[in-house]
Image (cartoon, rainbow, N blue to C red):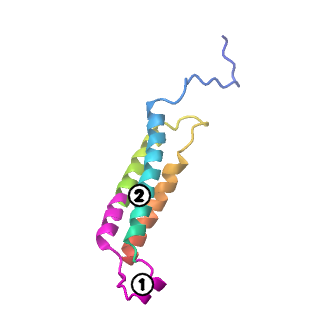
Amino acid sequence: MAYKRDVYYDRRKGPDLWVRLVNWLGLLAWGIMFFIIAITDRAKPPMETFFDRLFKVKVRQTWDIGLLQYAFYLMIALCVLCVIGLLINSRRHRRKTDKYNISLLLMMGLGIFSIIMYFANF
């Protein structure tokens, strides 16, 4: 087959190991973010309901710092995971049709924002 100057030939047979790894890291980042949200929800003080006031039940008024520290460590792990995934993605980003994994960018941004909010509030 003769080479044509303006025709693009994609010789790749599909995603290789590194591209699949980046996709799996994006999926893992979403899972970690889900756990961070769940842990943060458990760490916040519960709302006092009508029945709590009626039966004079004491409700915790402060955040659970132990759970928040665990969520903070998960935020750091999330950012490290996203940086590793984006480094791999940048090394595999050679053609115009290659794209950066938006999930990793989004999760890294949310992780950094969460770490800043943790330091600002606790």
Q: Please check the rendered image and state whether residue 113 is part of the magenta-colored stretch, yes or no.
A: no
Q: What residue would you read off at disc 2?
A: 35
**Residue placed at 55% from the left, 23% from the top?**
13
**Residue placed at 63% from the left, 23% from the top?**
9
Tag 2: residue type? Phe
Q: Nearer the viewer, residue 91 or 100?
A: 100
Quarter holding the N terminus is: top right
Which numbered circle lies on residue 52? 1
Q: Residue 100's spot in the image, x, y percent?
A: 54, 44
Tag 1: residue type? Asp
Graded by Cα atoms within 10 Å as few (under 14), some (14 to 19) or many (20 or more), the crowding at tag 1 reads: few
Q: What are the residue bounds of the magenta stretch?
A: 46-74
**Looking at the image, is 116 positioned above or below residue 107?**
below
Task: Say what secondary structure mark 1 lies in.
Answer: helix
Q: Nearer the viewer, residue 36 or 38?
A: 38
Q: Nearer the viewer, residue 30 or 60?
A: 60
The quarter of the displayed image where residue 5 is located: top right
Mark sitting earlier along the chain (2/1): 2
Q: Residue furthest top?
A: 1
